[in-house]
Amino acid sequence: MKPKELQVAAIENGTVIDHIPSEKLFDVVRLLHLEQMPHSITVGYNLKSQKMGRKSIIKIAGKFFSDSELNTLAVAVPNCSLVIIRDYSVVEKKKVTLPDTLIDTIHCPNPKCITNNEPMRTRFHVLNPALGIVRCDYCNRETTLAEVTVK
Amino acid sequence: MENRSLVSLVDYTKEKLVYLLQMAAEFERQPNRHLLDGKIVATLFFEPSTRTRLSFETAANRLGAKVIGFSDPKVTSSTKGETLKDTIMMVSNYADIIVMRHYLEGAARYASEIAPVPILNAGDGANQHPSQTMLDLYSIYKTQGTLENLDIYLVGDLKYGRTVHSLLTAMRHFNPTFHFIAPDELAMPEVWKSYCRDNNIRYVEHKEFDEDVIAGADILYMTRVQRERFTDLMEYERVKDRYLLKLPMLAKAKPNMRILHPLPRVNEIDYAIDETPYAYFFQQAKNGLYAREALICDALGITLDEIKA
């Protein structure tokens, strides 16, 4: 049997975010503020995936996120896989879950909402996590996560 | 300090609404009271609204407060690019309470989160207009002697009309039956019908608007069908006269029935109706004064007992 070949190099310690739909890669970067991190980050884009056809993967060496940081990913990539690596081994697998409140993670789709016109944080209340229905705490507009853009 | 701002009536309990109505009744008995001597009320109108501003300013004056503010944002620094936050923080240095009308939705909620003084929402875009709802409730209470078990007919623009949506939410405590009468393009949105179902509010949709339908009404709440709301102007031409209230349509009206309208009226209520006992829209506007005196006092922590004392 042909040995399994890694498309992206393994990391010794850190966090792996796998099964990201390719086009959502940069949403993940923004949500976790990866562009501001000093850690070594390996990004695989448009990799072949049996499950998804094409996928992206991000490996962040030496970084372990809090659950609340990781849960912000649920607004863009609710089905991604999170793997915690220690000493080259998988020590934990996680799924993201949508928090009750989303603070400054998404834009309100209502152009007349105050949050789109003032330098301020957005805040959404999650009404239905399964259907991804959220309500802006300011203008009260209800929307689905499929319709919003990540901040 | 507890945030006493009024952004929306949605979260108010039945008891709180009734309490504010009692306060308004007390102000109707005697509108001139020196409860706010030495206080300053700021009225910040980032969007012009003559009726609402005059009503709030009259309320403040009758309570003995001094009023500062602006009625036209063109004269303020917001035209120079000042943020809402900076304007609010600046005015908070001068005033004990801020009455604010803004064209952006959610502006009042945001202002209430940053201001060290209470904010009274005098309308934020298409979102909330709680003082209008309060005066509507007070008008219904006054004319019917109760808020319980009433048949309330909403006519005209039920899609964009923020007053009718606020009325639905405020009346949910009082077991009403709502009746919706609107052109298809301006029908009550599904999200509000589902709100009614979730909150056990009965509603009936009527196709016709005639004397037989009106015969069941305790309150006939008229709104303006505006031309600019229609995407199909042919449709507007077809339906525009169907939602005008004419005198003969009141032939079978119940004696207690009263006609409300948030004003301004254009032509949706025949002037001949003004002379009938059913017309109540001018008194309704006057009730706004008492309702707003109550809201200002409540936001400043003045209780009903103190007002009665």
Image: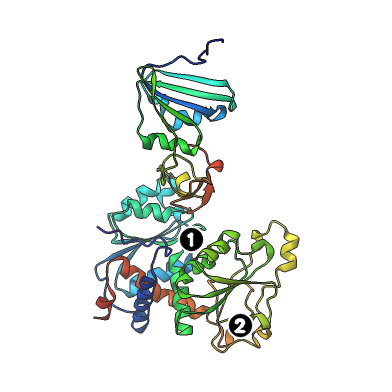
The spot of residue B14 in percent (x, y) is 39, 71
Q: For the residues tagged 2 and 1, is the chain the same? A: yes
Q: Is there CB contact under 8 Å for labels 2 and 1?
A: no
Q: Residue furthest bottom?
A: B255
How many residues crowd mark 2 within 10 Å: few (<14), some (14–19), many (20+)? Answer: some
Q: Which residue: 49% across, 31% down?
A: A80
The spot of residue B79 in percent (x, y) is 45, 48
Of residues B283 and B196, the one drawn nearer to the viewer in this rendering? B196
> In the image, is residue A105 above or below residue B272?
above
> In the image, is residue B187 above or below residue A39?
below
The residue tagged 1 is: B48
The spot of residue A62 in percent (x, y) is 35, 20
The residue tagged 2 is: B216
Of residues A109 and B129, the one drawn nearer to the viewer in this rendering? A109
Question: In terms of sequence position, does the residue under pointer 2 or pointer 1 come before the other?
Answer: 1
The image quarter in which residue A95 lies: top left
> In the image, is residue B68 above or below residue B76?
below
The residue marked by circle 1 belongs to what chain? B
Q: Which residue: 68% across, 76% down?
A: B209
